[in-house]
Structure formats: C-alpha cells, structure tokens
Amino acid sequence: MSRKLLAFLVSELSIVRIICQTEGCGLVIELPVAECLQSGNLPMTTCPKCCKPIGASTPDGTVQNAVAPLAKAILDLQKIEKRVQVELVLPGDEAP
Ligand SMILES: [Zn+2]
C-alpha cells in the first residue's frame, strides 16, 4: 500500500496566505513571509474586511500577530538551508 504525498522544502516557501474564517467574510490576504513579521500597517491582528480579530488572543486580552512565529521559523530555516533542509509533507488520499 502506498500513499500519495505532497512534500515541499521550507526553503521554497515565499508567500503566506491568510484566509479569514468569519462566516460571510473569507477575505484572502497573501504576504511575503518576511512581511508577516511586521505588525505595523499590516492586517495581522484584525481582518480589514470584517474587522474581526484574526490574531491570537493572549491571557491579558490583547491580540497578537499569530503568523509572526511561523514566519520567523521559516526565515530561520531558510538561513541554514545549506546545512539542513526541512520538508513539510502533506498526506494525500490512499492509493487505490
Ligand atoms: Zn474577515
């Protein structure tokens, strides 16, 4: 039995797509990985269409950019890609 797998290197990642899950919204935001680290003018904590929070809530009630840690990890791994490569693997459907 074999499984179809889709694998890609972290070094290949360049764009992060954020999709608002608020019912009736569904806004799609695509940003280069490095821009996800910044919170300034970017819509990383509140959806610009429906104004609902899209960040991570902290215990004190503030909303933080939840994508920033992912972007930092991707950029850190890309810096060391000559020494180690990390692949993300998505399992597909079972082969017939
Ligand atoms: Zn939204």
Image (spheres, rainbow, N blue to C red):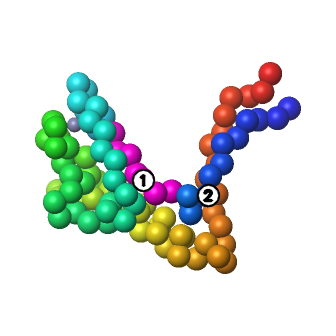
Asked whether residue 32 is in view, the answer is yes
Residue 14 lies in the magenta-colored region: yes
Q: Position of residue 67 (x, y in %)?
A: 35, 57
- The mark that comes first in sequence, 2 or 1, is 2
Q: Is residue 95 above or below residue 81?
A: above
| Residue that carries the numbered disc 1 in the rendered image | 15
Q: Secondary structure at mark 1?
A: strand
Q: Is residue 42 left or right of residue 73?
A: left
Quadrant where the C terminus is found in the figure = top right
Quarter of the render that holds ligand 1: top left
As drawn, the residue found furthest toward the left would be 51
Instruction: Identify the residue at horizontal 18%, vertical 48% (top origin).
Output: 46
Q: Position of residue 8 (x, y in %)?
A: 62, 52
Q: Is residue 39 above or below residue 21?
A: below
Magenta stretch, residue numbers: 13-19
Asked whether residue 57 is in view, the answer is no
Q: Where on the picture, by quarter, is residue 93?
A: top right
Q: Is residue 11 left or right of residue 29?
A: right
Three-letter amino acid code of the residue under disc 2: Leu
Instruction: Identify the residue at horizontal 66%, vertical 39% (top origin).
Output: 91
Distance from mark 1 CB to nearest ligand 1 atom below 8 Å? no
As drawn, the residue found furthest toward the top would be 96
Q: Is residue 35 above or below residue 47?
A: below
Q: Where on the picture, by quarter, is residue 5?
A: top right
Q: Is residue 70 left or right of residue 52?
A: right
Three-letter amino acid code of the residue under disc 1: Ile
Q: Position of residue 72 (x, y in %)?
A: 41, 68
Instruction: Identify the residue at horizontal 30%, vertical 44% (top origin).
Output: 29
Q: Secondary structure at mark 2?
A: strand
Q: Main secondary structure of the magenta part?
A: strand
Q: Which mark is residue 9?
A: 2
Quadrant where the N terminus is found in the figure = top right
